[in-house]
Image (cartoon, grey):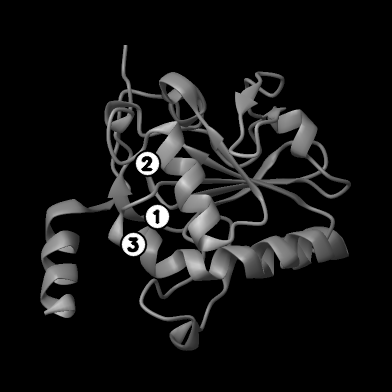
Amino acid sequence: MKKVLFVLMLTASFTVYASNKVGNLAIGDKPVLNEAKMADVSGAKISLADVKQENGLLVLFSSNTCPFVLQWEDRYPELKAWADKNKVGMVVLNSNHTKRDSDDSFEAMKKHAKEKGYNFYYALDDQSAVANAFGGQTTPHAFLFNNKMELVYKGAIDDSYKSAKEVKQPYLKDAMASLSGGKKIAVTGTKPVGCSIKRKIE
């Protein structure tokens, strides 16, 4: 029954990268809104600039209930450990503006983070400002920047949302390792797979 429900949810919410009337950061671009403060579930106010570390920054758009996120998020703490090891800051953003009164309210974010044992920043992207500036499309959708805050990778976390055991290409891990090792990143972009961001568009 759970499998059937999950398949139905995927069918209803599945999306792959598509054009949108928002920004679209290209490899080599620098982000905007670096200094904008966002409310984190810890109670702190943080900005992208605050989170950046010696070798760069990982920005991951996510949510509370997307079935793709629920499949992937058990790997988030491992990503955080990998980011720490490679001196890359990590922040997870919830940009689902149209669901602020329901599944993706700030209170729901705090509850979700506590239940899942999040050990990283999980912040509210108010008005979908960062998602719109970046061109974030799905939950999840990863954007990795180097120490100069230049975009070096964007796309999926890895090549298997279904199971960590089935991963053959850990895109984000490989990119962060290359970043910290001063090596060229082999794969700089992949199609993000997930639920569409329920964004605010002016």
Please tell me which of labels 3 and 1 falls first in the chain.
3
Please tell me which residue lies in front, 104 or 51: 104
Disc 3 marks which amino acid? Answer: Phe
Q: What mark, if any, has residue 192 been given in the picture?
A: 1
| Residue 185 visible at all | no
Q: CA distance from mark 2 to mark 1?
A: 7 Å
Q: Residues within 10 Å of mark 1 (few under 14, many from 20)?
A: many
Q: CA distance from mark 2 to mark 3?
A: 13 Å
Residues at circles 2 and 1 in contact by the CB criterion of under 8 Å: yes
Disc 1 marks which amino acid? Answer: Pro
Please tell me which of labels 2 and 3 falls first in the chain.
3
Please tell me which of labels 2 and 1 falls first in the chain.
2
Q: Give coordinates of residue 30: x percent, y percent.
A: 67, 30
Describe the element under mark 3 as helix, strand or loop: helix
Q: Viewed as shown, does residue 105 lie left or right of 59?
A: left
Furthest residue toward bottom: 165
| Residue 114 visible at all | yes
Describe the element under mark 2 as helix, strand or loop: loop
Q: What mark, if any, has residue 35 been given in the picture?
A: none
Please tell me which residue lies in front, 117 or 11: 117
Q: Is residue 14 above or below residue 25?
A: below
Q: Which residue is mark 3?
A: 68
Q: What mark, if any, has residue 137 been given in the picture?
A: 2
Q: Give coordinates of residue 2: x percent, y percent.
A: 17, 77
Q: Residues within 10 Å of mark 3 (few under 14, many from 20)?
A: many
Which residue is found at the position 70% from the left and 32% from the top? 48
**Mark whose residue sits in front, 2 or 3:** 3
Q: Is residue 88 above or below residue 80?
A: above
Which residue is found at the position 32% from the left and 21% from the top? 200
Disc 2 marks which amino acid? Answer: Gln
